[in-house]
Image: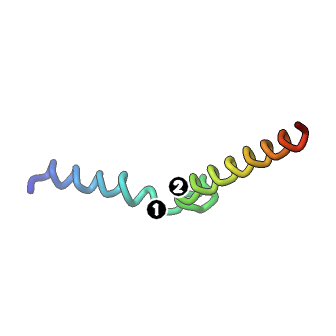
C-alpha cells in the first residue's frame, strides 16, 4: 500500500463513517445521523398534525 492509497482509505473512513456518528456541537451534541432522524421525525409529525386539522375542518 502506498501513501495515496492509505490517505484515501483514511479519508473514506473519516468522511463516510466517523463524522456521521461522532457528536457535533452544531447538532445539539448529537451525531448528524441522530440529528437528521429527529429532524425528519418532527417534520413528519408536523405534516400529519396539519393534515388532521385540514380533515377536521373539511
Residue that lies at the very extreme toward the top in this rendered image: 58
Q: Residues within 10 Å of mark 1 (few under 14, many from 20)?
A: few
Compared across the picture, whether 12 is left or right of 55 comes to left
Residue carrying label 1: 21
Q: Nearer the viewer, residue 57 or 4?
A: 57
Q: Is residue 19 left or right of residue 30?
A: left
Residue ranking furthest to the front:
58
Sequence-earlier tag: 1 or 2: 1
Q: Residue 1 occupies which quadrant of the picture?
A: bottom left
**4 horizontally vs 35: left or right:** left
Percent from the top left, x then y, of residue 2? 9, 53
Q: What residue is at 54 percent from the left and 58 percent from the top?
A: 24
Q: Is residue 46 above or below residue 25?
A: above
Q: Residue drawn at (79%, 48%), measured in percent from left and top?
A: 49
All told, the count of numbered labels is: 2
Percent across and percent down for residue 22 are: 47, 62
Position of residue 28 measured from the top left corner of the image (x, y, whole percent): 64, 58
Q: Secondary structure at mark 2?
A: helix
- CB atoms at circles 1 and 2 under 8 Å apart? no
Cα–Cα span, label 1 and label 2: 7 Å
Q: Residue at x 46, y 62 (%)?
A: 21
Instruction: Give the quarter of the figure containing the C terminus.
Output: top right
Q: How is the image coloured?
A: rainbow
Q: Residues within 10 Å of mark 2 (few under 14, many from 20)?
A: some
Q: Any mark on residue 51, and which? A: none
Q: What residue appears at the point 69 percent right and 52 percent down from the top-left corner?
A: 42
Q: Secondary structure at mark 1?
A: helix
Most extreme residue toward the left is 1
Checking the image for residue 32, the label placed there is 2
Amino acid at each position: 500500500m502506498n501513501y495515496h492509497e492509505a490517505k484515501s482509505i483514511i479519508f473514506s473512513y473519516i468522511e463516510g463513517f466517523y463524522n456521521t456518528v461522532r457528536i457535533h456541537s452544531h447538532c445539539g451534541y448529537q451525531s448528524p445521523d441522530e440529528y437528521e432522524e429527529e429532524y425528519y421525525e418532527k417534520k413528519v409529525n408536523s405534516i400529519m398534525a396539519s393534515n388532521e386539522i385540514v380533515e377536521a375542518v373539511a
